[in-house]
Amino acid sequence: MITVSQKKTNLLIYYQCWLAIVAVSIFFTNLDVYWQTTGILPLEPLHWIILLIGASTPIIFSFSSRKKFLSKSLLRWCVGYFVISLFYFWLFSSTPEAFQELRVRVLSIIFLLLALIIFSKYYVVQKVTRYAIIIAGLLATVINIYEFFNPLVFIAVNETGRAAGFYMNPNTSGSALVLSLIFGVDLLKPKYRAFFALLIGVGVFITFSRGSLIGWLIVMIILISRNIIPRQQFFLWFVVLATIVTAVVGITGNSLSLESLQDTGLINNNVVGRLQEFGSPSNTDDDAALARIEVVKLAWHMFSEHPFIGNGIGSTSSLNVGALSTHDISTHNMYLYFMADHGILGAFIYPLLIYAVTHPYQENNKYIIWVFMAFYLIWGFFNHNIVVQRFYLMTFSLMATMNQTTQRLNYKL
């Protein structure tokens, strides 16, 4: 016989699952930023987080019953990150850039902790969250393919000509797809995993993002070597895909070339440059790549001038160079981002976050931990917004709660 207490618990679990799906639908898909940018729903990220906090009130009120399921390592990292940020804000002049950076960091900490509570305690909640991430990844792949054949569909928010969908940035889109692969592949039956991985790979490839492609390849090597993705299934689907591509090229013959595709409007100069670079890595005509090299040099110079104390938070928020001189850009490197701000201390902030969410080590999550760590350690060299964007933060909280819940499997539903 189900008691009133059990009914209340089950209702709370169902509500928690619904809340997790809503969080993935809004934040992992990047719809919160897309809606604001396009003016469809002109709410700032802070407003969305406040709404999510309000909706999470029943979960937050049950904090005492779930606090032992929260990652102590991640909580300590959040406290340390806040203290360091506040200290450096006080130590250096309080410029508008520094204040904005402090605001963003505090908002990131709040979101990390909120997601940690939403995903906490119950294995079923984390499983539902991961299925929602699979769906979000498949949706993003379909949208990327559609945008690839209709380059003007997102032209108002994405001028690169490369597929990005709701993420509006090809690099961001590619990384989100890789994360959907990491968290979703083992939930699928083995016979579907290779197809899913290759489909995600197609979505990543048509973003023409160097970092995302490298990340996808590294993740695939680990998954295949650990036999999470059956080798035979993978090579079978790979041969099928290669055969289709070869057949298309054979039918079109010489008519299929970069020049002809560019003439039809299917690809633009940006995409052509990326394809030529893939074919010839020594090609140095990519202005965006050269500009990113320059910002890395500038950030390293800032660090080398003040290696022990740094330059204060927000110090790299307005680096203007080369092809990106019309935009305020930063380091495109998570490690240098913190090192320029905090000196040698900053070199440990991001790696410690990765360690915090994967500690303590859990055998049942072994493969996810390895691919998660490998991807994020590599991705840190290509992106400086990892500790800012909500869908990245969501995966850190999810990884932390998965490790905590695995220790107490009797709480499975």
Image: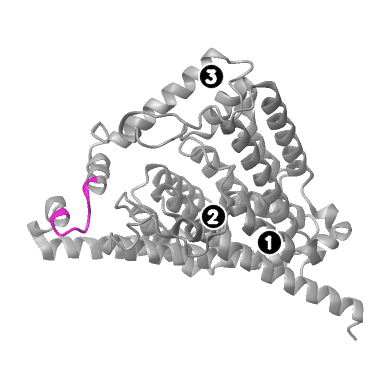
Point out the tag, 3 or 2, that comes first from the N-terminus: 2
Which residue bears the numbered disc 1? 52
Point out the tag, 1 or 2, that comes first from the N-terminus: 1
Q: Is residue 131 left or right of residue 12?
A: left
Inspect the image, locate mark 2, and give the three-letter code of the amino acid beneath it.
Answer: Ile
Q: Residues within 10 Å of mark 1 (few under 14, many from 20)?
A: some
x and y, in percent, of residue 260 in the image: 12, 55
Q: Residues within 10 Å of mark 3 (few under 14, many from 20)?
A: many
Q: Are marks 3 and 2 in contact (CB under 8 Å)?
A: no
Q: Is residue 381 left or right of residue 58?
A: left
Inspect the image, locate mark 1, and give the three-letter code of the amino acid beneath it.
Answer: Leu
Which residue bears the numbered disc 3? 303
Q: Is residue 263 magenta?
A: yes
Magenta stretch, main secondary structure, is loop
Above or below residue 353? Residue 371 is below
Which residue bears the numbered disc 2? 182
Q: Which residues are magenta?
A: 262-269
Point out the tag, 3 or 1, that comes first from the N-terminus: 1
